[in-house]
Image (cartoon, grey):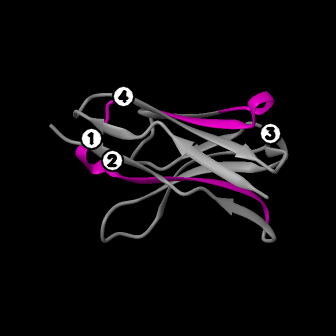
Amino acid sequence: QVQLVESGGGLVQPGGSLRLSCAASGIISSIYDMGWYRQAPGKQRELVATITSGGSTDYADSVKGRFTISRYNAKNTVYLQMNSLKPDDTAVYYCNAHYNSNHDHWGQGTQVTVSS
C-alpha cells in the first residue's frame, strides 16, 4: 500500500521559515517525480515545486527564490524548505509522487498558516 505522509506544517509569522517533509512508503520513490502542491481556501490546487527522478527542479513563479525542493532517496523522503513566508503562502500543502497515469499518489496534506 502506497502512503505519502507530510509533516512540518504549522503557524509561522510573515518572514519566517518552515520545512515540510514527505515520507513515502510502498513505492521506490527514487524512480518517481515528486512534487509539492498547495490549495488555499476557495482556490484550485496549484503546483508549488517539483523534482524529477533525475534531480531537476521547477518552481512556481510565486515561490522562486524563497522555496527549495530536495529529495533524499535513501530515506524515501522529499523536502520543501520555505523561507521568507508570506500570508499568501497560507494553504494546505500536498505531496505528490508521479511515475505515470497509473502510478500517481497524493498525501493527506499539511496546513501552513502564515499570520502575525
The magenta-colored residue range is 71-100
Residue 25: x %, y % from top left: 76, 46
Q: Residue 99 colored magenta?
A: yes
Frontmost of labels 4 and 3 is 4
Residue beneath the point at 59% across and 56% down: 107
47 versus 115 height, above or below:
below
CA–CA distance between discs 3 and 1? Answer: 30 Å
Give the residue number, with chain letter if any, for mark 1: 86
Check disc 3 and report its element: helix, strand or loop: loop
Residue 17, labelled with which disc?
4
Residue 34 visible? The answer is: yes
Do residues under tags 3 and 2 come within 8 Å of each other at their CB atoms?
Answer: no
Q: Give amino acid for label 3.
A: Gly
Check disc 4 and report its element: helix, strand or loop: loop
Residue 82 visible? The answer is: no
Do residues under tags 1 and 2 come within 8 Å of each other at their CB atoms?
Answer: yes
- Prevailing SS of the magenta stretch: strand
Residue 66: x %, y % from top left: 41, 33
Give the residue number, with chain letter if any, for mark 2: 89
Q: Earlier in the sequence, mark 3 or mark 1?
A: 3
Check disc 2 and report its element: helix, strand or loop: helix
Residue 32: x %, y % from top left: 79, 50
Frontmost of labels 4 and 1 is 4
Q: Give amino acid for label 4.
A: Ser
Instruction: Please name whichever residue, 15 or 77, is drawn nearer the observer in this view of the structure.
Output: 77
Give the residue number, with chain letter if any, for mark 3: 54
Do residues under tags 4 and 3 come within 8 Å of each other at their CB atoms?
Answer: no
Q: Earlier in the sequence, mark 4 or mark 1?
A: 4
